[in-house]
Structure formats: structure tokens, C-alpha cells
Image: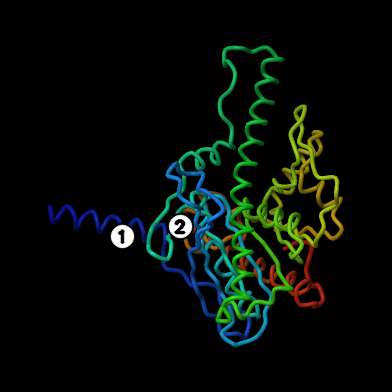
Amino acid sequence: MDRLLILTFCISQIIKGILFPDFEPLPVTGEHIVETAEETWVDKDRLETYTDTGENRSVTIKIWYPKEEGSYPLVVFSHGAGGVLESNASTCENLASHGYVAVAIAHPYQAAYVRNVNGKITPIDATFMEQIMTGGNAETGNPGKTAESDRKTSEEEKERQLYERQMEWMTVRRGDMNFVLDTLLAKVSQSGKAPYDRIDTGKIGVFGHSLGGATAVAAGRERSDISAVIDIEGTMLAEYTGYEKGKHTFYEEPYPVPLLDINSRAVYEEAKGLAAEGEEYVNFYVGRQAADFREVIFEDAGHMNFCDLSLASPILAGLLGTGTVDEWECLENLNELVLNYFDCYLKDQPLVIKDSY
């Protein structure tokens, strides 16, 4: 038995070394010394919908902040489906080194796993993961029917199911984002201690990757205290207002705050293809209507090149989708772009960004 345990341990360490090799993290480019803190908060106003135990939903966050006393803009990050608390730790740490309080949210049951401050681990919900992997669709209709009308009805029903599930995901995400922002702002007035005494409540930005990008866009639409939003390759699901007659409907009111949409060339071209087929891509619609909108394209990037997994686990990231771009260079450019955009709208500095990288 001892030999079996030793062999199992050795194999697990080999697999871990292959999937998660040692890597050099991106260096910060700012001058501030960065400190961190982690918190787990219970939202007494929401029940956990991924369980039937009647417990309240809890959220774990990590905060990167300057060691030096002062008043700094607040930026809050939301990871993608199946992401983790530190999915974009390099981005958050770099922001803090330039004088920001950066907060990342771990969304329980929608994250690969969440470890709270007491060590409890919550894995991803199996149904949610299946929905993400299958595009949110369930089988509908009788596969034996081949009539065009039956096929069309089946496809429309699948799209409606997908829309309904996406709205369920966004309800959870919106709740988490609002809860974290409201709690942070309350602690600024109540705590008087680091890191909360560093937060300038008049300068707030939100950003996210993939489903987290959709979450950030939702916050910018709904809240009056958000000054800038960055969506990193996320379909703006919260901009849907309904699904009627086989098509989505969108907000008629222009998007109210400055919005930066970051995409890979592959996703951008795919979206253009949908538009050519008569299907309106929500991000394009929002961009045309927004009061202040910019779009930046990353050449040769894949979806996972926009998070730290591309460095932490090149094999796993490759399986999930990376491009031919240099992983290190792509993240450096992303972190610089995020910093420059927030510097413009939260620190009143000139906007210095390119249309493509």
C-alpha cells in the first residue's frame, strides 16, 4: 500500500509539473509596492441558487493595493466561465503598481473552483460546466423529423433555451458584482483601515474576461458610479432585452459610459460573418449606439491568451484555445492597454492606445 501511495503521489506530481510548470510571472511596470488581501463575504440578501440547502451565497475576492497611503481609483475584475480568482492576477497586480486598488471576484460554481478564506473549496457546478461546453443548448424536438419547418422550430427553441440560460448566468454574475461593489464602498466609510482606506469612491472602473466581460458591461449599464468599462472578448449578454421571433432584441438607449471592447482577430471576423448573414452581433450594435466606444483587435491571439493561464499552463490553455501569438507579449500588451484605458478615464490622462496589437 505504501508503494502504491508513493507511486500515485509521484504520478500526480509529474502530471502537475506537465500541466502547471514553473513559470516566470510578468513583472509589474509601476513604482508602487503592492500588497494583497483576501476576503470571503456572505450576501445575506441572496440565497445560493446552485444548491438546495437554503444557504446564503458567499463570494471570495482578492485585493491588490499600493502599500503607500493615498487615495486610488478602484477597479473590479470578473473572470470568465471556468476561470479562477487569479485568472488575471498579472493585470490586477500591474494596475496596483501604478496606483490602483484592484479587486478580483471569484464566482462560486461558475469558477473552476473557489477556495474561501477558511480553506473550503467549491468546485464548478457540473450542470453549468455542461451548459458552457455545449453552448447552453439542450436537445429538443424529435431527431427523426426532417421537415424544414420542424428543423427551424427546433433551432429557434434551442436559441431560446440558450438565451434563458444566459440570463440565468447573468443574474448570478450581476448579483455578485453589485454585492462586491456595494460592500467595498460600505467598508470605505466604515473601516478606515487598509486596503479600504486607499479607495477613491469617485473613480471606479470594471473589467472582465469572457463571461466576466459581459458582467462588467452589465455593471456599467446599471450603476451610476462606474466611470469606465473594459470587456475582454466577452459577448455583451446583458445588453439583450429579449428574444423574439428568432432574434435577440437590444437596449435602445445608448450605452452610458466609456466602453472598450477587446477581441482577437478570429472572434472579430467570426462576428462580421454573422453580420453578413443578417444576424446582428450584440457587441457591434452596442458599439454603434454607445456614447464613447473603442474596439481593439489582437492579431493571432486565442481566447485564453487574454488570461494568465496561457503562462501558468500552456498545455491546458492550448486545449481551451490559444493562438500563435507569443503568450508573454500578448499579456504584456493587454496589461498595458488596460492600464492606459483606465488611466484616461479614472486619472484624466491622455488616451494612448492602438487599434490593434
Spot occupied by residue 273 in the image (x, y as percentages of width and height): 76, 39
- Give, as a three-letter code, the residue at label 1: Gln
- Give, as a three-letter code, the residue at label 2: Val
- Whether residue 302 is visible here, answered yes or no, is no
Spot occupied by residue 224 in the image (x, y as percentages of width and height): 77, 62
Q: Residues within 10 Å of mark 1 (few under 14, many from 20)?
A: few
Marks 1,2: beta carbons within 8 A: no
- Whether residue 55 is visible here, answered yes or no, is yes
Residue in view at x 74 percent, y 73 percent: 202
**Up/down of 311 relative to 140, above or below:** below
**Up/down of 127 relative to 40, above or below:** above
> Which comes sooner in the sequence, label 1 or label 2?
1
- Dot 1: element: helix
- Find disc 2 in the rendering and name its residue: 114
Along the viewing direction, whichever of 133 and 220 lies nearer the viewer: 220
Q: Image quarter for residue 326?
A: bottom right
Spot occupied by residue 225 in the image (x, y as percentages of width and height): 74, 65
Spot occupied by residue 40 in the image (x, y as percentages of width and height): 48, 64
**Up/down of 39 relative to 164, above or below:** below
Residue in view at x 76 percent, y 66 percent: 227
Residue in view at x 68 percent, y 12 percent: 147
Along the viewing direction, whichever of 129 and 4 lies nearer the viewer: 129
Residue in view at x 43 percent, y 50 percent: 123
- Dot 2: element: strand
Q: Residues within 10 Å of mark 2 (few under 14, many from 20)?
A: many
On-image quarter of the C terminus? bottom right
The dot on residue 13 is 1
